[in-house]
Amino acid sequence: MTVFIVDDDASIRDAVANLLETEGIPTRQFGSAEEFIATWRKNMPGCLLLDVRLPGITGVELQEKLRQLSVAIPIVFMTAHGDIPMVRRVIKAGAVEFLTKPFQKEELLDGIQQAFERDTEQRRQGALLDSVLSRYRTLRPRELEVMAQVTEGLLNKQIAANLGLSEITVKLHRRQVMEKMQAASLADLVRLAAMISASVSGSSYTKV
Amino acid sequence: MENAPTFNNSPWMRYGVRPLAIACFFIYLTSLCTLILQRIFPYPFLFLFFVAVMASGWFGGWVAGAMSVALSTLIVQFFFVPPFYSFSVSQAAGPYFFSYIVCAALVSWAAASRRHAEDVIRESRDLLEQRVQERTAELQHSNQELQQSERNLRELTEAIPQQLWRADATGEIVYCNSHLLDYTGRTQQQMHGSSFFEILHPEDLAAFLDAWTAARESSDSARGLEGEWRIRGIDGCYRWFLIRAVPQRSDSGAIECWYGTHIEMEDWKRAELALAASQAQLAHVARVMSMGEVTASVAHEINQPLTAIVAHAYACLGWLKAANIERAQTTVEKIVQEGTHAGAIVTRIRALFLKGEVRRTRESMNRIILDTVRLLRDESIRRHVRIRVSLDSDLPLVDVDRVQMQQAILNLAMNGMDAMEGFPTGKTELLIESACGEDGDILVRVVDHGAGIDPGFITRIFDAFFTTKTQGLGMGLSISRTVVEAHDGKLWASSNPDGGAILHFSIPAPQRETGTP
């Protein structure tokens, strides 16, 4: 886990890096938002320690840009003078913490700790979703139809009538779905379906 | 007979036929009378011939006189001198006849010359009369022209869309045009003899009288007065006018009368006041905003090194705990660096208060004060504050930055006007004085009659951001002090014994080259 420090003031970057080094936290420094975007890759775990005022793309703009790019790296903001509307805006947009310079060591470490936890959780969730999605992609078209109707709470008889199949065939497809999705119960399958519909857009899920 | 000299101008007629006819007529008449009388009285009536000669000379002139003398001589000799009816003259009658000729010639000459003299007199009298008539006609004509031109001029004064007046040397109005009458709602008779001062706004009266006196006592005889003052209208409202008046002076330089014009500038003035007010507001907003920005930038600039220092200090603690002395040392060095950097930022921001380079030139402090008062004019009118200036004309010139010095005086004056805010109009006077100090320093005093200074604040009022006003920034007096001290001067405050405050500053005079402004 690395702290990516983005601040145009080299002395601040240097000092924060020095402080985090005493805690054994690795850091990487960037003088601008552009520099960070150019360097950062998805396989780099950690959090962003971001100054609000930056030359070029500002901290707030970088947050927006990352959201658009679906980059979920947690952000800890820092600024010399944060006004309340701005703080609300960035926190609402998902920032972990907002530090006012000069900040205390505990504030910084707390923020970074939270951000690290969020990153770990996000990465875990991401990995889980990836496996669910890969399992979901192995379903055949008829199985997808059956799964959609099952998770909507329809009975086998109703599904058979809807799809013009025999009840036996529906039961076979349903068992196949449970097996492929590695679902232990119907409740488990509904949870997996909800995860999929949250990641992919809902409409594409129901239409499949 | 009166027209005889002009009857006929031909010489032959004038000196031949006419005199002869006249002479013959009178002699013939006399001869007849005498011959008839001769029958009645035994003595000859020769004196009748003198009458004939005289009449001929009188009516016919020299020539007729001479002719009648000759004719009468012949007649007398023939009829009345013995021997009668003969042209010969007896020895005894000789002297008698001779004396007759002499007397007749004398009578003729006297009559003719008398007549001639009278003719000459009459001629010259006629000529004179004619001349008088001609002159009279000319005068009448030019008088008419004069009346016409006066009428034209009067119509012109009515055609000009301005108020015009003429006043005598004491300022009493003698004439004013209908625009002024319509505006003030008075008649010509009411205006006549009334003082011009009566229609002026009481607040403007003092300034007007100053200008009036200055114009009257000016060595430049053509100098008039000009200014923007308020005049009361028929509705009782005062409106702004550009008032100009020029004196007409006699050869000795004494003022004979004044000619004045008023140009209404109420709309313009209103717009100007509104503009000034919005400008002042804008300036205030701009000042507040720039101060806000300065504060923000100060905070930001100072915060950066502070943040670094705090972070480094924590790191240093961490390294010390970990017994990593080497890293702790380098971290402390960085703290020193950052601290020094923060100090430099503070110095730079303080230098910002005196923006730009100080450009000292040799200036008259009185001129600077007067220029500043001009800048304050609209503001003072808006606030109903009268600014009075009392200047020492023997001040030496000083080496100062003109703009900064104006700014300093302006701030002091604005402070004084702020202090009088809400005080009754009649009492709000701001006095700006200049004087020469004992050691040759130049002293400037700004005296107000406002609320005065709380004794507890008297040492703090020049501090930056110190203010007792809800709207104030606490920068004005602080800037004034910075400017005055940059000129090696001193700025201090004291209480005005008449109420209010006095702000003083002194500027040392340069060592050499003194002169009057």
Image (tube, coloured by chain):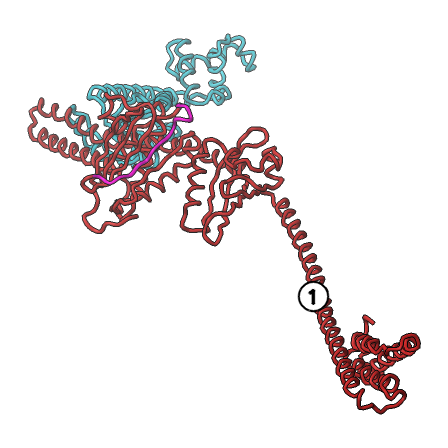
Q: Is residue A102 left or right of residue B190?
A: left
- Image side of residue B336 versus residue B77, left or right: left
| A115 relative position to B52: left or right | left
Q: Chain coloured red: which letter?
A: B
Name the residue carrying label 1. B128
Q: Position of residue B186 (x, y in %)?
A: 61, 33
Q: Residue B60, located in which quarter of the rendered image?
A: bottom right
Above or below: residue B306 compared with residue B483: above
Does the magenta portion include B432? yes
Residue B209 to residue B247: above or below: above
| Label 1: how many Cα within 10 Å (few below 14, some 14–19, many 20+) | few
Question: Camera-side residue: B63 or B216?
Answer: B63
- Placement of the N terminus of chain B among the 4 image quadrants: bottom right
Is residue A203 or residue B120 the one in the foreground? Answer: B120
Tell me where residue B474 sits by quadrant: top left
Residue B140 at x, y percent in the picture: 69, 56
Chain letter tied to cyan: A
Up-down: is A190 above or below B167? above
Q: Position of residue A176 (x, y in %)?
A: 43, 15
Q: Residue at x 41, y 23 (%)?
A: B424
Q: Which residues are magenta?
A: B422-437
Q: In this orientation, which residue lies closer to the viewer: B376 or B320?
A: B376
Vertical side of B477 occupied by B7: above or below: below
Q: Is residue A33 magenta-colored?
A: no
Name the chain under label 1. Answer: B
Three-letter code, disc 1: Leu
